[in-house]
Structures are given as structure tokens and as C-alpha cells.
Amino acid sequence: NGDFTTAVAGKLTMATNAAFPPYEYVEGGQITGIDAEIAAAIAEKLGLELQIDDMEFDSITETVKGGKADIGLAGMTVTPDRQEEVDFTVSYATGIQVVIVTEDSTITSVDDLFADNASHVIGVQRNTTGDIFATDDIESEGKGTVDRYSKGADAVQALKTGKVDCVIIDNEPAKAFVAEVEGLKILDTEYAVEDYAAAMSKENPALYEAVNTALQELIDDGTIQGIIDKYINA
Ligand code: ARG
């Protein structure tokens, strides 16, 4: 403790995209959710004050890499490409990519998106793994096109208004969005299972060590599961 430096002295600065319930969202003008509480618990262990910077999802990695934020915490999936840019802490949660459709959709399983004659318009949040899957596995194969939105909720609205045929997104925000918009459902078959972790700069190993150790302790003593259960299994 004490021999690391942070972006702003005395603070742990978290970069996030607060449009991803229940991991991070705005409620009563405050950013709240699982990731916000995890960051607060890490900050407390390190004797730092938590500051949360809200931004586009696809700015988080750059912000962390450039040292403008200490930690990217945003339900972010560990991927090999991202690991070239940033270091990830231990994983603190699992995410599942699911497909949202309208209740009367002709898409009844994930396989329908890969059918030989498929040509769906797929809505995603820009630069998320949902975007990467849809782009690499479907659009690049000539089996549809991808519409990229700055927020997952905007992709879901586009589904509601018929601009896209489905949305590929993480299961927990999917549940939250489907609960708010009538006439939508989540397909039973899952697209992919992923690990969420915090992104950190490769250039600040002392801070990485401190944060990763704090997070591991919070996992081991059940604090993280307690936070997740408050939002998910309640
Ligand atoms: N898990 C997905 C990814 O890493 C989506 C994360 C989106 N997070 C957010 N706060 N908007 O690409």
C-alpha cells in the first residue's frame, strides 16, 4: 500500500459507460450498479476516494491505456484483442451474450442467424463483444448487416421500431431492457459465455498489483458475490 500512483492523487478514477444495467446505470443523477459498488469497495481498501467518469464504451480502453483513468470497469469482457491494449484483473463475473427478438420474430434460435440464406439486420452496442461477434461471424460471412448504436438501449429501441431484426447483447442488461420494453423476448439459446474483468494500464504495475490484490480479497471474502446478489439474484 502507498507505493502506487493514480491518475489523480488520492483518487481511484473509474472509466465506465453507465448505460449497462445492472452493472452501471444512472439513478437519481448518480452512477450506481455492481461495477460502481465493486470500485467503491476496491477504493476503500486502498484508502482512495472513488471518482467515476462516464463515457462511450469504446473510449474506455484508450482512456485506461493513456492513464487518464485507473480502472476500466464496465462489464467488460476479457478478449485477446483487448489484452494487447490493457491488462485485465482477475475475473469477477460471468457474462453471456444473448439474442433479443420481438415476440413474433421468425428468428427462433441463434442458429437462424447463421443459416445459409440468412440476411438479418443485427443491432449492437458499438465495439462490444456483441458487435464483434455479429461483425465477424455474420456480417463478414455475408449473412446480414450490423447496426451499431452508442447505447444498448438504443439498439433495443431500434428493435422495437423494426429497424433491426434482433439485438446481441449481454444477458443482464438484456433482461433489464426487455423488462422495460413491451413485446420483446430473449432467445433461450446463448451466443457465448464470457468473463468480465477490470481493464488497467500495462504501464502502472504497482497500481495493477494493488487493485488486483484488493479485488481478489473481495472475491475471497464474499463481498463481490454479495454485491452481485443484491442486483441479480434478488
Ligand atoms: N461485455 C461486453 C463487452 O465487453 C459489453 C460491455 C458493455 N458495457 C457497458 N458498460 N456498456 O464488450
Image (tube, rainbow, N blue to C red):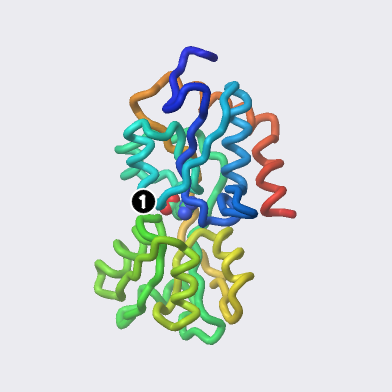
What is the residue that sits farthest to the right in this orientation?
234
Image quadrant assignment for residue 39: top right
Q: Residues within 10 Å of mark 1 (few under 14, many from 20)?
A: some
Determine whether the residue tagged by mark 1 lies in a helix, strand or loop. Answer: helix
Please say if 125 is above or below 23: below
Residue 21 position (above or below residue 104) = above
Q: Measuring 61% from the left and 46% from the top, which residue is drawn there?
A: 34
Identify which residue is drawn at 40% across, 78% down.
164
Q: In front: 150, or 198? A: 150
Q: Amino acid at mark 1?
A: Asp
For residue 222, side relative to residue 197 (left or right): right
| Residue 177 position in % (x across, y down) | 57, 67
Q: Which residue is mark 1?
A: 58
Q: Residue at x 52, y 27 (%)?
A: 11
Q: Residue 214 appears at what percent x and percent y?
A: 58, 26
Quarter of the picture containing the N terminus is top right
- Would you place residue 1 above or below residue 118 in this image? above
Image coordinates for residue 46, horizontal then vertical, percent: 58, 22
Tell me residue 93's x, y (percent): 57, 45
- When asked about the image quadrant of residue 49, the answer is top right
Seen at 70% across and 48% down, the residue is 229
